[in-house]
Image (spheres, grey):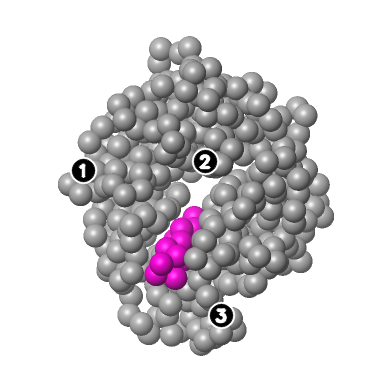
Amino acid sequence: MKRTDVAAAAFCAIVVSCTSSGPKVVDELTVPGTSTAFTFDIGQVDQGRYYLADRTNKALDVYDAQTGQLIAQIQGGFAGQTGANNDTSGPDGVNAIPGTNTVYVGDVSSVKVVDVGTKTVVKNIALTPPGSPKPSGLRADEGCYDKDDNLMMFSHPADSPPFASFISTTTQTLVTQISFTGSAGLEACAYDPATKSFYVNNDGTPANPNGEVDVISAASVVAHAPVVAKMYPLGDCGPTGLDLGPGNEMVVGCDPSGAAGGAPAGTPIVTLILDRTNGNKLASVPIGGADQVAYDPVSNRYFVAARRWQTGGVLVPAPAGGSLAVVPSLGIIDAGSRTLVMRLDAGNNAHSVAVDGAAHRVFVPHQPQSSNALFPAAGITVYSTR
């Protein structure tokens, strides 16, 4: 299910950066059932398949990452989009177990296990807040996979207090949970096999009102007593996406417009690169307003879904009764020099990004954007990585 190559050619006729010498738009994919609306969350690529949490169709969408053909829209009780409330909507986070047909998908008060081979939801893992006998009706959001201990971590950002659940991928049952007392919410996480730790973006705490990275040792999770061993302050970041980079690097997407502590006007809109062993800031790259971020080891580049990027590169708060003046973008950062390679236009609410390094393709879903002729309809823009 793709639009014609004429659509991609039209992009390159308008966007200056669509040249043969760098990343450019190469395709535009359609999503069935989204003619009037399209809401979605996180995406991921694994084994040549692109997965997208599609709330409009209450499905996990599966595409062939090389050809762009739709393989399936797998349904099975996902909540869908409930009005404008993301906290009660799903599917959310998407986490494949590499080398298998199994994908763990966050949903409302649960995580669903999807078998892509049979195109079915094979298990619904119900999740309640720690100490509570009842589900909260709020979502399990983004997650990450610990292949060393066969664990899947999911953040529950909207509960009070926010908490994280750790699920055994061997038994497909809950192992343990941890509450984040005083936290304003949780975002993306990543597991590092080198330090054997989980890293998770914390929206804000009394000590760091506009965000920190919390570090949880896998050993404490295995012992059913997870604790935050370290935390890295992020300043006026408003952290969202997180991924591991080369060496000891870690990339953190920032969105100061959503900072829990209220980032001041004029705050730089950036993406941070940290040393994940000690939290030292290695670079502050001038592209941001992000949600999901992704590292591609093939091109050695970071890709930033910067839906709330603003011209000028600093936070200009929305006027009373108005909205942010944003320029949705895909930011591309060279991991070697830690510098911005390029900013490409993206469609409305382009907050999800997934990379197939082998195919040199980047997938960024979006809603229609009346202010940009490049995105007249909902879809998935496909960019090249180089």
The image quarter in which residue 212 lies: top right
Name the kind of residue labelled 3 in the image: Gly
Percent x, y of residue 28: 39, 72
Q: Are marks 2 and 3 in contact (CB under 8 Å)?
A: no
Query: Which of the numbered marks, if any, corresponds to residue 22?
Result: 3
Q: Residue at x 70, y 33 (%)?
A: 231
Front position in the image: 276 or 77:
276
Q: CA distance from mark 1 to mark 2?
A: 30 Å
Span shown in magenta: 352-369
Q: In the picture shown, does residue 15 fall above or below 55?
A: below
Q: Earlier in the sequence, mark 2 or mark 3?
A: 3
In the rendered image, the residue lying farthest to the left is 118
Q: In the picture shown, does residue 191 fall above or below 305?
A: above
The image quarter in which residue 217 lies: top right
Residue at numbered disc 1: 120
Q: Earlier in the sequence, mark 1 or mark 2?
A: 1
Percent x, y of residue 188: 55, 42
Query: Which of the numbered marks, if any, corresponds to residue 193?
Result: 2
Magenta-drawn stretch contains 304: no
Percent x, y of residue 53: 38, 49
Percent x, y of residue 308: 63, 57
The image quarter in which residue 271 lies: bottom right
Task: Provide the secondary structure element on which disc 1 rests.
Answer: strand
Q: Earlier in the sequence, mark 1 or mark 3?
A: 3
Task: Provide the secondary structure element on which disc 2 rests.
Answer: loop
Task: Provide the secondary structure element on which disc 3 rests.
Answer: loop
Q: Left of 372 or right of it: where is 89? A: left
| Residue 69, visible in the rendered structure | yes
Q: Residue at x 40, y 16 (%)?
A: 134
Name the kind of residue labelled 1 in the image: Thr
**Camera-side mark, 1 or 3:** 3
Front position in the image: 135 or 378:
135
